[in-house]
Amino acid sequence: MRGGFLGLAARWRRVESLAIAALIGALVAAVWAPTAASAAPANDDFAAAQDLGSSLPVTVSGSNFGATLEVGEPSVPEAAGHSVWFSWQAVETGPVTVDTCGSDRDTVIAVYRGTSVGALTRIANGAGNQGLQPFCWGSKVVFEAVAGSTYAISVDGKTAAPEAEGAFSLSVGRSIPPANDSFSQAEPLSLDADVYEWGDNRGATKEVGEPDHRGEPGGASVWYRVTAERTGGITVDTCVLKQEFDVAVYLGSSVSGLAPVPANAPRKPCGYSFDATAGTTYYIAVDGRAGVEPGAVEMGMFLIKAANSPRNDYFAEATDIPFNMYVQFFMFGFANAGATKEPGEPAHAGNAGGASAWFKLTSPISGSVRLGPCDNDFHALVGVYTGDSVTSLHPVASQEVAPGRACNPLAPGVLAFNVDPGTTYRLAIDGYGGAVGSFGVMFDASTERISEPLPTATTEPAVRKVPQTRIAKRTVQAGRGRAVFVLGSDQSHSWFRCGLDKRKARRCQSRVVFDHLRPGRHVFRATAIDAAGADPTPVVVRFQVRR
């Protein structure tokens, strides 16, 4: 009887185990059933894109749950690989917004032109950024729609998002212009070098009579204004996030009567530096460049700031140089474009200059330092002083520095002077005759004091003449497509510009090497330049390459 009871119990446990297994299997099937059912949304493929018609606005619900990438489908930055497709036809030309702002998760949107998934041209794309875009948790893009064109829109999940698949809301509508779309509504900017402000040219337009900014047609400009607090340089910068914007600066009271303000330094498309007069208001246009589609313009968000340039233009705003006893170091990224000369400021190294930037350092030791500009692309003046105001300075050392000084504090001719503990030294870097450019600052300290006389006078002759360019050596290996030129000048502080054939002349070293030249005739030109000017008769070398 006992054996029968135990056998019955064993059979009961087996039945119980099978029931539990069946229950688990049913639960798993229930969980995975929706996945299998939604593994391929109806609009998973480009050819089966959901038609949104042509009327605006339009909003639809969608899901990319279980969606996949097709063979040949273009890749989109930050897309997770679960795209679904929509199609919309434009009936009129103008800016259009596509967004998933009604969604509660990050998405990636891309807009295309083309008739097959393997031959698409991307017009715009954007990735959700968890609310960084104002009033939009999802994604938002704006593009210039052309009447009669059909656009393909893909919606995907974002790779970094917790959920790359799921439901979303997609809207297409006419874009609302930014508040500062028109010149009359230019937004004011503060002159604070530490403050960037958000800008957005999505949906912006070009007004009647508005000029082509920087010579580009653009078409999606927004406007800003800044009033100079003092006479000197101002720099406007939009380079932090994107490089697809052109910046231009104007004077005037109406959009059709604007006068461009000249730049005071080489211009970057995303930035502009100019000389300003105290109390004058300047107008700044930020416009998009030509897009990938004819008639389209780049649009998006950017960061913009305006600041006095350089920040250390005034004696009272000198940049600190840290005093490090154990490491030679260099500081880069300085410029004196837009700098001025203050009333009572001395002539550094005996030259009037006119565009000085100020630095300062406080010595904790008794010893000496070697410092000054390096990697400079202009003829510089250096003056070192003690004193608490620009009108009560005591000279310590001064020097002229030819363009292109290497960043080596131990090189011969580097400015060196003795320092005392607790004393603050002021360093002015100016341009000979008001020359401007960019430079770095090099520094080296020692506990040893200098016994030889300190350099306190100009190292240049009092009377200057324009340099004469010379070819010290030339070697042409015609069979290898190689040419080497060694340049010289009758002035010790010269630098050079070189050009080959029809290429634009650029700054070059004294030794110039060309490799892999094409067969045929070539023309090499070189010009020596110094503070007195450029050689009016540059050297010209004609040579031939054979293969």
Image: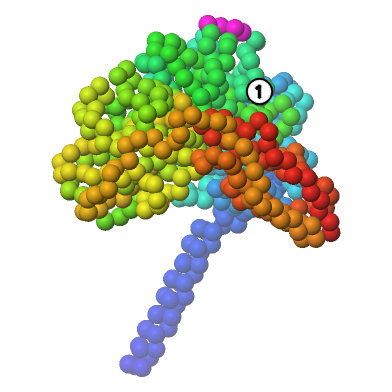
Nearest the viewer among 217 and 206 is 217
Q: Percent from the top left, x then y, of residue 166?
A: 53, 46
- Label 1 packing within 10 angstroms: few (<14), some (14-19), many (20+): few
Residue 489 in view: yes
Q: Number of labelled discs?
A: 1
What residue is at 78 percent from the left and 40 percent from the top?
A: 115
Where on the picture, by quarter, is residue 60?
top right
Q: Give the range drawn in magenta.
A: 253-257
Image quarter in which the N terminus is found: bottom left
Asked whether residue 34 is drawn in magenta, I would say no
What residue is at 36 percent from the left and 15 percent from the top?
A: 229
Q: Percent from the top left, x then y, of residue 249?
A: 53, 19
Q: Percent from the top left, x then y, of residue 159?
A: 52, 51
Is 34 situated left or right of 521 in this image?
left
Q: Say which residue label 1 marks.
A: 215
Q: Percent from the top left, x then y, of residue 488?
A: 60, 45
